[in-house]
Amino acid sequence: MGWVAVLEPRRAGRVASLSVTPECRAELQELSDTTALDEHVASISWGVVAGGQLVEHGCTGTLHDHLPADERAVYRIASMTKSFTAAVVLALRDEGVWQLDDPVARHAPELGSVSGPAGSPPITLRHLLSMTSGLATDDAWADRHLDITAEEIDGIYAAGPTFAHLPDTAYEYSNLGFGMIGRAVLRATGSRVQQHITSRLLQPLGMVDTTWVRPEHEHWARPHRWRDGELVRDWPTPIGDGEIAPMGGLWSTVADLAKWIAWLDSANSLPHQPASDGLSAASRREMQRAHTYIGVTTVAGRSCPAGYGFGLNVRDEPSLGKVVAHAGGLPGYGSNMRWLAGRGVGAIALGNTTYAPMGVLTMRMLDVLLAHGHAPATPVPAGPHWAAAAHRLVALLNEWSDGDAAALFDDNVDLDDALVRRRAEAGRLIAAHGPLHIVELRPAAATRGDIVVQGTGATFTIGLELSPLPGAPVQFYEIDC
């Protein structure tokens, strides 16, 4: 009989000054405990990110010898590694080392033998990053070959791997493709992508427990699988670093991954950050934009359109909005990170049972955070032109002046509905509601949104859009009362 894990629920703990409510924290812990029991996960370490910090942590089960699965317990994060590799590729692009549409063989000539069926274009870095190379999905094979040697993989490249699609025609998840990226980085820079990730990303971000090899200390989660009705150790010992490790070789912790999520998502809410912190905000946003349409996918029982960015998945969730995520799975491990784009809120779950469905857990964690009011709406700052136009429009409606109208509106406004008619409409509006004042500005973008106004009665809205011409004149407004 193999080694059997004992599931021991542990109380969730606060990690930073910000926190969720006790009721919310209890629900999150219950989700973890239930997931571990139902899905036979040896241990789970989970965390909540808010305001750029890890604000809550909890765990179910223990690592071994009753060591706690705390926020610094190390798990293998598998394909979550792809986001780190993608960040390095973009950093090198930004530095002028290459362009994403370069054929990969331009930088690693030995990859020239990897070509699709007749009529295929050359495989580019963009194809590999966005899962459109056409290379056949290879999870089962790749998960047992992270440590493949250069000589062994060169034989595969030379023989010509199998393709599922023509390149640049369809989404097809390829781990081997990220191995090819690793080779291109090595040839273009003289250093392995692993070294770039460590020096450019892990060290500057203070991700001190994230490594390419199994920790030397004992605070790491041993791999397990569910077999014949019991949890047993997954043998052999986890394989080490190798040629396709850029697709899934990293080990990490909830505490470190909270820093990674916060750094990636800060680019959505702070768009003008300098590139001095490893990768520009623009390139981080590029990672989180869908470049390949995957289709309608289902997570935690909910279906919605999904796409693949660069090393990250993107979902358009009806209740949560734009959600960015990536899962990881290897023999003995399952992991997921997921966050609400631009809203500073995310969830992490790491488990040590083969392919543990941590993505379902993180999705349900976000649902709980939303239900308890811990997932604020995406902030949209009012552009200065739009805010000024909103005040000028309300003033105009209160006391119409043809000169003020001509100065505020673009020429299409008079053509769409003559100013004389608009002046009469404004007069009827004020007669019915009294002088208006602005209650709230609700921008949807820098140049459009709703103005919430009130007179002597209930509030109502005025939709306002600016034109793209210099000076941003008003091209459209609509009163909804």
Image: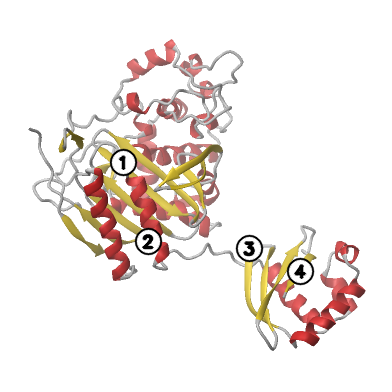
- The disc, 2 or 4, on the residue closer to the chain's N-terminal end is 2
Mark 1 sits on what residue?
77
User: How far from the left and from the top, in percent, is residue 402?
Assistant: 90, 77
User: How far from the left and from the top, in percent, is residue 145?
Assistant: 30, 24
For numbered disc 2, what is the local secondary structure? helix
- What's the residue type where badge 4 is placed? Glu
- The disc, 1 or 4, on the residue closer to the chain's N-terminal end is 1
For residue 400, the mark is none
For residue 368, the mark is 2
Look at the picture and state if 419 lies above or below 229: below
Label 3 near label 4: C-beta < 8 Å?
no
Separation of residues labelled 2 and 4 (CA atoms)? 37 Å
Separation of residues labelled 1 and 2 (CA atoms)? 24 Å
- The disc, 3 or 2, on the residue closer to the chain's N-terminal end is 2
- Can you tell which of label 1 and label 2 is closer to the viewer? 2
Mark 4 sits on what residue?
478
Which residue sits at x=42%, y=26%?
Answer: 137
- Kindly give the residue lying farthest to the top in the view shown: 159
- Residue 93 shown left or right of residue 31 in the figure: right
- What's the residue type where badge 2 is placed? Val
For numbered disc 4, what is the local secondary structure? strand
User: How far from the left and from the top, in percent, is residue 254?
Assistant: 29, 52
- What's the residue type where badge 1 is placed? Ile
For numbered disc 3, what is the local secondary structure? strand
Count residues near mark 2 (Cα–Cα under 10 Å), then give few for <14, some for 14-19, many for 20+: some
Separation of residues labelled 4 and 3 (CA atoms)? 15 Å
